Amino acid sequence: MFKIKVVGDIVLIKTGDQGIVINTGDLTVVGRLAAYSVDHERKDTPISQEITNFMHVITMTACCAGVFFFVIAFLVGYYWIDAILFMIGIIVACVPEGMLAIVTIALSVTAKRMSSKNCLVKNLESVETLGATSVLITDKTGTLTCNKLTVAHVWFDNQIGEIDTAALQNPAISFDTMNSTWKNMARVGILCNNAEFEEGSAGSPVMHRRTIGDPTETALLRCVEAIEGDAQMFRQMHKKLVHIPFNPDSKIQVSVHECQDFKANGYLACLIGTPDVVLQRCASALVNGQDRRIDQDYKNAFYYALNEMAGLGETVIALADARLPPQKFPPGFKFNGHQVNFPINGYRLLGLASMIDPPKASVPDAIAKVRAAGVKVIMVTGDHPSTAVAIAKSVGIIGLESPVTSVTLTSCPTSNIPAGLVTGEDLETLSPDLLEDTLMRTEELIFAQVKPEQKLQIVETCQRLGAVVTVTGDGINDAAAIRRADVGIAMGNGAAYTVKCADIVLLDENFASIVSGIEEGRLMFENLKKILLYSLASNVPEMAAFLLSMLAQLPLPLGILAILCIDLGTDLLPAVSLAFEEAEMDLMRHKPRNPLNDHLLSEQLLFLSYGQLGLIQAASGFFTYFVIMAENGFWPSRLLGLRRSLEYTCQAGFLFSVVVVQWAAVIQARSRRLSIFSRPLNNWILNFSLFFETLLAILVIYIPGTEQGLQLAPMWPIWWLPGLAFSMILIAYEELRKAIIRKHKGSWIDKETRF
């Protein structure tokens, strides 16, 4: 008996064994699907676009401002080298040097939180993109369901028989096992099948035995073994000569075997596949022990049984066989499974088998939460439409009472409909415009019996409509769609190439983890805005120090090295600590953000950071600067030609005042609208960062040698107090602003300052 192996399989070679390579690389089915997915790469994620745009804006602003003030400095009489130093200072002050590191750390923090929920994040940017998801496209088998199939019903001789799926051994059945049609069905089910029981599991009940093989083939193997007995012995009596495995294009699998009477009656060909395809390939049917022509009456009975079984949410397959005429296929004939040299049409239809694949327990609640968060859930499956609808209703993708409308070329929705069903055959006839109309006008939508390239078509259509698309799946058929989606999520036990294409892997295969991922992504975007507010606010006093020094020709209040101490030292850890903030409200009750309108760097955020908080920090720094100068006898009118040591002391005072006011800024940045008194200081990373930045500021000011290295000189502790006063001013201002926002929603303050 020959066995088909694919890449990744382990093959043990014994003396005298022979093997043949059928195809390699892109010529294989897996290779074709992989190559197809490579040809459809995804675009940049929304967060990468946001960060890129932010850095472009900041860089262009810094360069233009630097060049502009270089010209101004040169015109007002500075030497060219001093003008260049002013230009460098302006550029350094404008650019938040630690921003990329802060964003990367924030993404890593979220990825770490998701890893504790058995979510492997392969692409850090995908976490935030998952939070912006507006359309979730999900596979059925293995994603929504357990992918543990058990044969529950069979149909032959125009009757549906039941099999007890709860029994571990010798299940109760409602049909005659001595029936000739059943015997032929069982023979095809066990022969056209590569599933096997693992060695050493023979003593266990049939349903608990460990197996190797596809879930559908495993279900057939266990069913026949439980009802008929020793399946392995039966296989040995019917030597397999060739096997064509199932693939999503043909939707069938075929095998040819030697029977004891093959010399007289010909080789036995077995066929298993999707019901519609198998019916098309059959010319006759076995009914009550006799072959009969497939006429309209038989087709009506066939489709009635198919809809009944699929309507239970079960996966249905059809089984057929044929005897190959010995005149054309004599003993010793060399069958070729690649360049097929035997018929795969004109078979004899035996019946149907349906397998129950129960939904995962966590899926219905997860679907409800995702939909409540404003995310549209679309099921895309290769299963029969009735099976897809039944599973969709059981997990909540479609309401139990929602009427499902079949969408075809002639019945495309012209107005909104509650639920729609599109088959792969109908999808081929829909133009891109009609598909877009269907996606927009159908609240609950299912695609059934679709091909891999059609899944990709659905993803790209949703993206053209402006949606942020997340795709979940586990099979090789899902690889192209997962790779093209904005976020691709694979199940941990999925196909190796699909896992490779995915951004996030659910190690425990828990669909509910997607809900946690969406919430974490939304929280991360909220926290990134808080980080930006905090980080950008300190740029104002840094720029103001250079501008005032240049325009008023004062001793420099804050040097370039001191600016770097703020941006890469005292500000870094407090900014990172904001990534650990918890949500202010239930983020899953709001619609996903629109990446085209809701940007990371908004006008409101810039106005609040530069136009309000930053000005308070600049005032604090200058106040401390002038206090130190005045106490040393130099009033603002006499600040020309001062000694260097006093200038360095003033720079130290300016730096420390900015750090102290940044305390208040980071505490206020924890919430966008709530009072700081309603949020306990339970973020211990932030608490430590406040202590750390204060200690770092004291060290860079008071450690001997910093006067030459960092141009900072020690100062009296009493000069710490002006910064504390301005911290109180900032807190009072922010509390007043937030109180107005809470009480007067939609007011000018709310619209212009709530970022």
Image: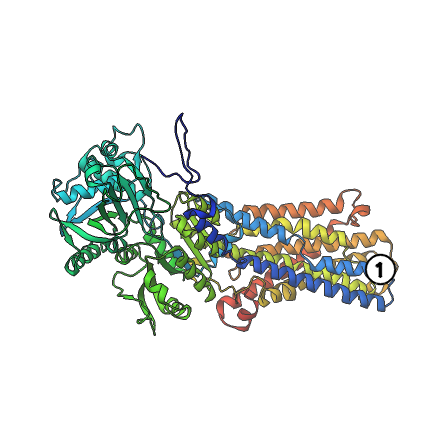
Q: Is residue 749 left or right of residue 611?
A: left
How many neighbours does mark 1 have within 10 angstroms: few (below 14), some (14-19), or many (20 or more)? some
Where on the picture, by quarter, is residue 332?
Answer: top left
> Considering depth in this image, is 194 or 116 the residue closer to the camera?
194
Q: Residue furthest front?
A: 327
| Spot occupied by residue 577 in the image (x, y as percentages of width and height) | 57, 49
Determine whether 15 is above or below 51 in the image. above
**What type is the residue that disc 1 sits on?**
Asp
Q: Position of residue 77 (x, y in %)?
A: 87, 66
Residue at (76%, 51%) from the top-left corner?
Answer: 561
Is residue 56 placed above or below 203 in the rendered structure? below
In this rendered view, identify the residue nearer to me: 127 or 7.
7
Q: Quadrant of the C terminus?
A: bottom right
Secondary structure under the numbered disc 1 in the rendered image? helix
Q: Quadrant of residue 667?
A: bottom right
What residue occupies the far top of the structure in this picture? 15
Q: Estimate the x, y position of residue 279 in percent, counting from the top left.
A: 23, 54
Which residue was labeled with disc 1?
82
Q: Where does residue 333 sit, x and y in percent of width and height?
A: 30, 39
Give the colour scheme of this rendering. rainbow
Q: Is residue 221 above or below residue 687?
A: above
Query: Would you say residue 682 is visible in this rendering?
Result: no
Q: Which one is in front, 299 or 748? A: 299
Is any part of residue 299 visible from this angle?
yes
Q: Name the outermost residue toward the bottom.
A: 414
Which quarter of the image is occupied by the N terminus? top left
* 657 relative position to 15: left or right: right
